[in-house]
Image (spheres, rainbow, N blue to C red):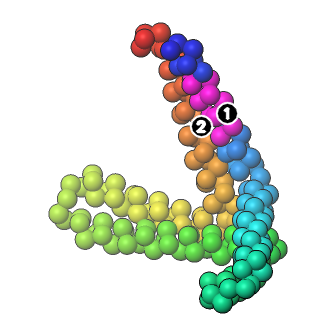
Amino acid sequence: MDKFIKKVGLTSILTSIVFALIGLIMIGYPATTMKFISTIIGIFFIVVGVIKLINYFVGKGNDSTLFTNDIAWGFMAIILGLVTIVYSSAIESILRIMIGIWIIYSGFMRFTVAFKLKDTINKKLWAFILILAVAMIIGGIYVTFYPGALVVTLGVIILVYAIMDLIESFIFMKNMKNML
């Protein structure tokens, strides 16, 4: 049992280190990371498209509309895959702008709710809600106008998770004997 627990602890530490490296890469190289992710997604669509085309030609003797749709879906998936690979920066920009606008919208909604609650709740709680709303608006503006914001933010979240997991793993490993 002791060896098993030690192995689990070491695996957790190794996983945390890998996540920390991924987070650092995302923070340091957001454009390259987005290009890599877009390429992987594009390749996935192309593979799905090729599989659909193969299904069509293998099942060509069937008059089923299922097989007839395979050729349309196959070509569309291949085209979508190529577009995803070739226009990865445009896709990232559109996604970033849409998410940024949604965050700004949510911030303004919370801002108006905070003012509606001003007279009905505790002043400290009201101020906290107002500060969070303003922070959301600022965060939404940041995401909308900073090209690497989504990838960098996700990288920071992954890095923070990895650090917290590492600390927890070391505490677990250090106190393992007390638990048995």
Would you name the residue on which mark 1 appears? 17
- Callout 1–callout 2 Cβ contact below 8 Å: yes
Residue 174 shows in the view: no
Q: Nearer the viewer, residue 128 or 27?
A: 27
Q: Amino acid at mark 1?
A: Ile
Quarter where residue 12 is shown: top right
Would you name the residue on which mark 2 appears? 162
Tell me if 48 is positioned left or right of 174 in this view.
right
| Relative height, residue 16 to residue 180 (above, below) | below
Crowding near pointer 2: few (<14 within 10 Å), some, many (20+)?
many
Residue 92 magenta-highlighted: no
Tell me if 131 is positioned left or right of 27 in this view.
left
Quadrant where the image shows the C terminus: top left
Q: Nearer the viewer, residue 84 or 69?
A: 69
Crowding near pointer 1: few (<14 within 10 Å), some, many (20+)?
some
Q: Which residues are magenta?
A: 8-19
Tell me if 125 is positioned left or right of 60 in this view.
left
Predominant SS of the magenta segment: helix
Which residue is located at x 57 percent, y 14 percent?
Answer: 3
